Amino acid sequence: MLRIIGAIILLIGSQNLIAEGESINMYLYPQDDACVGQSLSIEVEAEFLGKGTTYQLYVDNNLFDEGTENAFFFQINSSADIFVKAIDGENSYYSDTVYKRIIPYPSPLSIDSLEMCRDSCIELSPSSDAAIFTWTPGTYLSQSSERIYSCCADQNITYELYMSDSSGKCIISSPLTVTVNNCHKAPTSTDQKDIQKEFIIKVVDNDLLIQSLTNQRFDVSVFDLNGQLLINASGVKSSYLKNSLNHFSAGLYLVYIQAGDREMRKKVFIQ
């Protein structure tokens, strides 16, 4: 009799040890990287668990959700370690921990419209955190550097900029409307000889510096991209002209130089 009772106790103890050693399987979807705000789902599989089992979802070791269903539907905004804990009576069981990488979307463009003068160009660039980007349509666009395109439109146009991370998985789009204005221009030259070698035009510490290398008189006009005249100086006698631009908004400006019957123009950027 004692042997039978001992065998029963040993059998019950063995069953508890087996139960404690059981693991639960957690299936996390999608299995690859996900984007911020993308819906995630988890299904828990453990045939030995009863209907009264409580399931707990942990994200970075913090309780995120719980319930009696063996499935979870949720969203997280950053990469995290994820596992599920199942509580069946006095016993607890754990799934393996899975690291889920969450990819942020690139930032949208900070503006949705630009204005420019006809017969001029403006520069277009994506958000700084966009690894892959595409301008649609490609009309009036030419690539001037790895991330900058020159837009030389002669009529109004709306572009759609598609941006994503380096994997191309998390894509965001931003519209940008370019309005082309018929701007007031400096007088046109009857003689289009190149005079660029005779003048130096540059911006240093937001000061516009213009130097005549031949000490000739010249006229200066500065316009914004809306065609508004901002600076106008005629008959400059000195070989060197300096104008502070600190009160101007950051962006591109058009500088026109006219010396006699010859003319040159240059775009400058003000920070």
Image: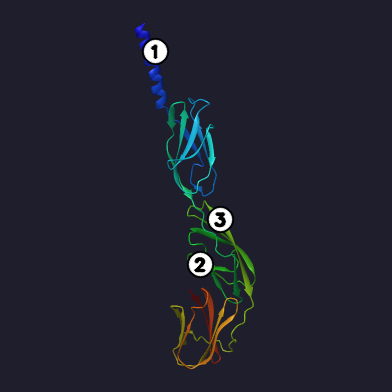
User: In the image, what residue occupies the spot 38% across and 19% down?
Assistant: 14
Give above or below for 237 relative to 10.
below
Answer left or right for 213 relative to 223. Answer: left
Q: Nearer the viewer, mark 2 or mark 1?
A: 1
Q: Residues within 10 Å of mark 2 (few under 14, many from 20)?
A: some
Q: Earlier in the sequence, mark 3 or mark 1?
A: 1
Q: CA distance from mark 3 to mark 2?
A: 18 Å
- Give the residue at mark 3: 172
- Give the residue at mark 2: 148
Name the one closer to the observer, 163 or 191.
163
- Mark 2–mark 1 CB contact (< 8 Å): no
Q: Secondary structure at mark 3?
A: strand
- Give the residue at mark 1: 8
**Three-letter amino acid code of the residue under disc 1:** Ile
The N terminus lies in quadrant: top left
Name the one closer to the observer, 96 or 247.
247
Q: Earlier in the sequence, mark 2 or mark 1?
A: 1
Give above or below for 6 relative to 130.
above
Q: Residues within 10 Å of mark 1 (few under 14, many from 20)?
A: few
